Amino acid sequence: MNNSGAAVEVTKDRNGIDQILLRNPRGTSARVSLHGGQVLSWRTDRGEELLFTSSKAIFKPPYAVRGGIPICFPQFGQRGSLEQHGFARNRTWIIDENPPPWHPNGSNGKAYIDLLLKPSEDDLKIWPHSFEFRLRVYLTADGNLSLISRIRNINCKPFSFSIAYHTYFSISDISEVRVEGLETLDYLDNLCQRERFTEQGDALTFESEVKPSNGKAFQFSESISIDRVYLGSRDVVAIFDHERKRTFSIRKEGLPDIGVWNPWEKKSKAIADFGDEEYKQMLCVNGAAIEKHTHSSRALGCPFKLRTASNANKKNP
């Protein structure tokens, strides 16, 4: 869990829940909670927080924390009979003290932790499938954050599931960002009963309006949010924050979809663990397998990598 100057420290939060602090040799850090196996913080070597967490977030089970990177499994949203986004984000994970080894030289400079989740008897009553969910969270030597999920079928009876890394990015202002890598893709709009549209713009922005393929315009006003699943997306999607001159690069494998969510003003006021104005400082962009459920007969890996870069001396493309 520790190599070449990287550090791993286990602490407890104010509710007595174990948290793991990862720190690479340059001082970049990430904090992971055993409640939900959730990354709660990712900070640069200058101490800048890259993930959003609501000021009203609840850090006590059985509630999921509003922010960071919740793991949505085995269901995304309300697309099934389980609770919203499945139960993995509300369960207590354990640390694997003897994780599988890295490839030769694969751990150089990395701070990492392996977490495990197995279903309880109560979980099997509502979702009758035996599995082992391994989550490896690591910081690279240059500060990139990666999550690798490996879901193993225990009894080899095939089952299907959906999964998403529901990442809350911290941004300067929602009107100052754009998302690239979604152009020409079909998407399901959850605000229109999952009606299917095609993305027409070169980039997704959040200032005045978005026009789906049917020609209707969505005005981003106090009554409108964005809640979409882009289908068959590229393996790399980028978020550009013009004011902070920062780029988030999202790289994924085995995850065909991208979810994009911001509650906007009206819905923000209806969410108990979310501040009325906090929608301006966050954007969820999620690597996911949502529309076509993933089938598992043995084991499946789902790598998800985040990279941030300062563009102070560059022009955004």
Image (tube, helix red, strand yellow):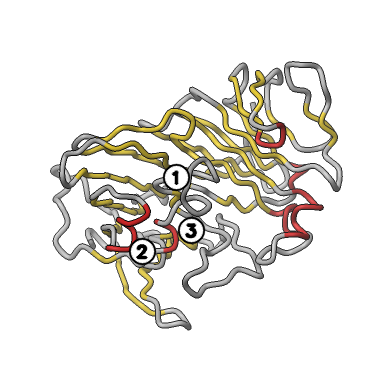
3 and 1 marks in contact (CB < 8 Å): no
Mark 3 and mark 1 lie on one chain; the one further toward the N terminus is 3
- Per the image, the residue denoted by label 3 is 42
Mark 1 and mark 2 lie on one chain; the one further toward the N terminus is 2
Above/below status of 253 relative to 83: above
- Is residue 122 toward the left or the right of residue 185 in the image? left
Q: Amino acid at mark 3?
A: Trp
Report, in whole angstroms, how far the alpha carbon at label 1 lies from the one at label 2: 28 Å
Report, in whole angstroms, how far the alpha carbon at label 2 lies from the one at label 3: 9 Å
Mark 2 and mark 3 lie on one chain; the one further toward the N terminus is 2
Nearer-the-camera pick, 49 or 97:
97
Q: Nearer the viewer, mark 1 or mark 2?
A: 1
Nearer-the-camera pick, 117 or 21:
117
Report, in whole angstroms, how far the alpha carbon at label 3 lies from the one at label 1: 25 Å
Q: Amino acid at mark 2?
A: Leu
Rendering quarter of residue 158:
top left
Mark 2 element type: strand
Mark 3 element type: strand
- Per the image, the residue denoted by label 1 is 75
Rendering quarter of residue 117:
bottom left
Q: Amino acid at mark 1?
A: Gln
Residue at figure coordinates x 57%, y 26% from the top left: 181
Dividing the image into 4 quarters, which one contains the C terminus?
top right
The circle on residue 22 is 2
Q: Nearer the viewer, mark 3 or mark 1?
A: 1
Q: Position of residue 95 (x, y in %)?
A: 25, 65
Residue at figure coordinates x 65%, y 18% from the top left: 198
Dividing the image into 4 quarters, which one contains the N terminus?
bottom left
Q: Position of residue 138 (x, y in %)?
A: 33, 53
Structural crowding at the residue carrying mark 3, measured as other residues with C-alpha within 10 Å and reported as few (<14), some (14–19) or many (≥20): many
Structural crowding at the residue carrying mark 1, measured as other residues with C-alpha within 10 Å and reported as few (<14), some (14–19) or many (≥20): many
